[in-house]
């Protein structure tokens, strides 16, 4: 955390505009362009267009890409034999016909599962026979599928359950030349995981995820799940600066139990401290519009089509 981020998006207090101050060791035009693009609004397709097709499936990713999402978001976990796969939950039951923890299984075992039929059962109105038998995807399958104009927003999910995921992820992203070409952001709730990635390759733009909720001991106060920042009303410029030392942005929830946990002032304060603000997971158009009015830098959504229609 003491290291200065080699890439940073800074807010000019003079112009009020997000400007890029990058001291990247590998200062490529593509990386610069990616950082510049973070100044404008980013549509982040949450697990693909997961409101329309099984989350983290090729169908969901293809839909989101076809609609023009800026980033395809996926959660990355590790199999028992060291492969990286796109899967959100720590356990298999909700979105596949498997059982148990995903990282207790080999890739071959996971590949034998049906990760699509659950969607048809859960959403009969959206059911599509083509989703039946959808496979859990490896990171390589995803990267191989899309052209070089596609950007990915990858989360190290539950890194405590996926030891070595950071090294595996960075190694693969480097092999696919995803970093210097400005095609990837890495996000995590786990600050240590982000710092590990920053040490492995300081050129990778990072997003610190946070989750605000009422404090157990005092429900009138909010608390941040991982302890990365104090509550939105208590966060100082120094707190944000500590995040800006390694990350280019903050990914935050907007609501807890239907009630807002952040404010427009929180968004502005984070931006004034050099952090782009991306908010998850926003599916209702009125909430999208409110956050757009606040000037957030991006929204995670299961419905990129709705958000794109709103922002066009
Ligand atoms: O990555 C942002 C958002 O996706 C975090 O929540 O649980 O959907 O991964 P989750
Ligand atoms: Ca995620």
Image: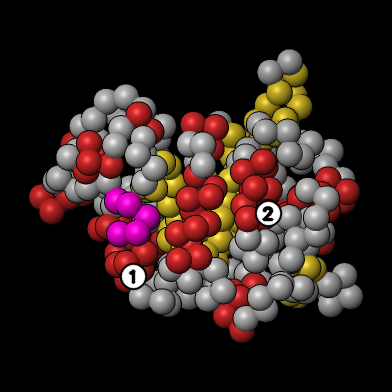
- In front: 99, or 231? 99
Q: Position of residue 127 (x, y in %)?
A: 17, 47
Circle 1 — which element? Answer: loop
Residue under the image location 17 percent in, 40 percent down: 112
**Residue marked by disc 1:** 146
Cβ of mark 2 under 8 A from ligand 1: no
Please say whether residue 131 is one of the residues in the magenta stretch: no
Q: Is there CB contact under 8 Å for labels 2 and 1?
A: no
Q: Position of residue 273 (x, y in %)?
A: 82, 59
Q: Earlier in the sequence, mark 2 or mark 1?
A: 1
Disc on res. 199? 2
Badge 1 crowding class, 10 Å Cα cut-off, few under 14, some 14 to 19, many 20 or more, is few
Residue under the image location 76 percent in, 73 percent down: 23
The alpha-carbon separation of the residues under discs 2 and 1 comes to 28 Å
Residue under the image location 36 percent in, 46 percent down: 83
Q: Position of residue 171 (x, y in %)?
A: 49, 58
- Placement of 68 over or under 223, stated as above or below: below
Camera sees residue 50:
no
State how the image is colored.
secondary structure
- Placement of 16 over or under 285, stated as above or below: below
User: What are the residue bounds of the magenta stretch?
Assistant: 137-141
Please say whether residue 138 is one of the residues in the magenta stretch: yes
* Horizontal side of residue 78 vs 170, given as left or right: left
Residue lying at the far top in this picture: please name it. 217
Residue under the image location 50 percent in, 65 percent down: 174
- Placement of 184 over or under 180, stated as above or below: above
Circle 2 — which element? Answer: helix
The rendered magenta stretch, by its main secondary structure, is classed as: helix
* Horizontal side of residue 266 vs 58, given as left or right: right
């Amino acid at each position: 955390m003491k290291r200065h981020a080699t890439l940073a998006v800074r807010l000019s207090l003079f112009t009020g505009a997000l400007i890029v101050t990058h001291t990247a060791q590998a200062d490529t035009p593509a990386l610069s362009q990616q950082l510049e693009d973070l100044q404008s609004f980013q549509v982040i397709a949450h697990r693909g267009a997961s409101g329309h097709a099984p989350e983290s499936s090729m169908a969901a990713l293809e839909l989101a890409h076809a609609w023009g999402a800026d980033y395809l978001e996926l959660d990355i976990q590790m199999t028992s034999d060291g492969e990286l796969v796109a899967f959100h939950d720590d356990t298999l039951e909700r979105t596949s016909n498997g059982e148990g923890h995903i990282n207790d299984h080999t890739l071959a075992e996971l590949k034998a599962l049906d990760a699509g039929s659950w969607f048809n059962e859960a959403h009969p109105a959206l059911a599509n026979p083509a989703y039946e038998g959808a496979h859990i995807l490896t990171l390589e399958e995803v990267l191989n599928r899309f052209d070089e104009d596609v950007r990915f927003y990858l989360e190290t999910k539950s890194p405590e359950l996926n030891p070595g995921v950071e090294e595996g992820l960075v190694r693969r992203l480097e092999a696919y030349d995803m970093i210097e070409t400005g095609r990837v952001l890495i996000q995590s709730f786990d600050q240590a995981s982000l710092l590990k990635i920053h040490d492995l390759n300081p050129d990778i733009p990072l997003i610190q995820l946070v989750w605000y909720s009422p404090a157990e001991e005092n429900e009138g106060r909010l608390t941040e799940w991982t302890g990365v920042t104090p509550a939105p009303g208590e966060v100082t410029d120094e707190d944000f600066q500590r995040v800006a030392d390694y990350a280019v942005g903050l990914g935050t929830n907007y609501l807890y139990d239907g009630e807002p946990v952040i404010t427009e002032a929180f968004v502005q304060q984070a931006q004034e401290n050099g952090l782009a603000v991306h908010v998850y997971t926003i599916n209702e158009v009125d909430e999208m519009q409110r956050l757009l009015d606040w000037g957030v830098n991006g929204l995670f959504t299961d419905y990129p089509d709705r958000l794109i229609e709103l922002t066009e």
